[in-house]
Image (cartoon, rainbow, N blue to C red):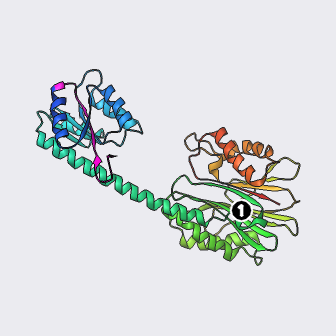
Amino acid sequence: MNEGDLERPIFNVLIVDDTPLNVRVLQRALMCEGYQTLVAYNGREARYLAAKHMPDLILLDIVMPEENGFETLRQLKSNPATQDIPVIFISGDDQVETKVSGLDAGAVDYITKPFHLDEVKARVRLHLRLAIATHAMLASQAQKLKQIREAQTSLLTQPADHPDARFGAVFESLLEAGGDFYEVVPIGDRIYSYFLADVAGHDIATGFLTAALKVLLKQNCTPLYQPAESMRMINRVLLEILPSGKYLTAAYLLLNRQTGTATIVNMAHPPVIYQPVDQRPRLIEIRGDVLGAFGEVTFESVSLQVEPGDRFFMFSDGLLERIGARTVWTATISHIVEMIARLADYPIQDACDNLSTKAKERFGPVDDDLIVLGVQV
């Protein structure tokens, strides 16, 4: 639908038939109803016009030379630009099997020849109304999901919120409500905790966990508990609130800049990468169970002595896995280590940005949520 002006939308119908008389009859009838029309006499021309002008509806003959209506419809549906245009078949074949095949192929309706113009006009009007209603519903859903995404993103801590935490972050959500999350929690003077999680599944309920996780981290990541103890306490709460089948993989870093110590806990997540000043980055590989799935869990931890300028990089598997290419992080993480090595002289936020960009160049476009969290001692 095009907007002729604010009050009068313009509807465009593409008529496809190899018989000029049928085209003229249909064209005249629809134009008398106020529709604009496009005309094609074969399937190839129809596909070209559909992609170029994006009509609101297509009336498509089945029996045509070179390319029949079924093949035209198949190719229209295989093109992302035209796959949502409603198509009504008009054909002299009144066999039930043909009608069913047409509807199964993606047509929204089937009119038999010889057609009655009143029936054609009624069906065109009906399916244009349905298309408008569908578009309005999808737009409404998209707007609601956009609001959810904006709300979720607004809950993520930004580097400017805690300048002394000295971190950079990249967050990209595949869907409106993403399943990846990070948080930075001040524990004391020059003591911060950094948490990054990937929630299994992508749906609206997953997005709502962001607020719950922020609260749990602030309540349980305190000087009273060791990092592994904090994660066990959070696990107990998640067991109560997560629906069946939901769980988190996560990485947790407690950095005490006063004492120069860093403690890392890993919960079945890709390993944290540690980059000492003037040294090659290395993986911190430790074992741990997922969060929110089991009552009895084991979380290993490792503590390191660190120096000013040392760096840690945490990330979700969306940085280095590609579901479509069936690549997993265990096969690609060595490339991430090399990328980080070449970013040693970049400011921490620039290093995160460049790591995300270089990973996309190396592995292809992302097909999952993505977070990169970089921390400088």
Where is residue 346 drawn, in percent x and y?
79, 49
> Residue 113 falls in which quadrant of the image?
top left
As drawn, is 365 to the left or to the right of 191? Answer: left
Q: Amino acid at mark 1?
A: Pro
As drawn, is 156 to the left or to the right of 281? Answer: left
Residue at 54% x, 72% y: name it.
241
For the residue carrying disc 1, how many other residues have a C-alpha within 10 Å: few (<14), some (14-19), or many (20+)?
Answer: some
Q: Is residue 11 located in the magenta-colored stretch of the structure? A: yes
> Residue 66 falls in which quadrant of the image?
top left
Where is residue 91 drawn, in percent x and y?
18, 32
Q: Is residue 163 located in the magenta-colored stretch of the structure? A: no
Where is residue 307 drawn, in percent x and y?
89, 59
Visible residue check, residue 245: no
Q: Where is the C terminus found, in terms of image quarters? A: bottom right
Residue nearest the viewer, comparing 317 with 207: 207
| Up-down relation of residue 345 to residue 292 (above or below) | above
Where is residue 130 drawn, in percent x and y?
27, 51
| Up-down relation of residue 69 to residue 327 (above or below) | above
The single residue placed furthest to the front in the displayed view is 5
Residue nearest the viewer, comparing 237 with 140: 140
Residue at 86% x, 53% y: name it.
276
| Up-down relation of residue 70 to residue 263 (above or below) | above
Q: Which residue is mark 1?
A: 159
Visible residue check, residue 10: yes
* Residue range of the region highlighted in magenta in the rendering: 1-20
Q: Which secondary structure, mark 1? A: helix
Residue at 68% x, 71% y: name it.
232
The single residue placed furthest to the top in the displayed view is 66
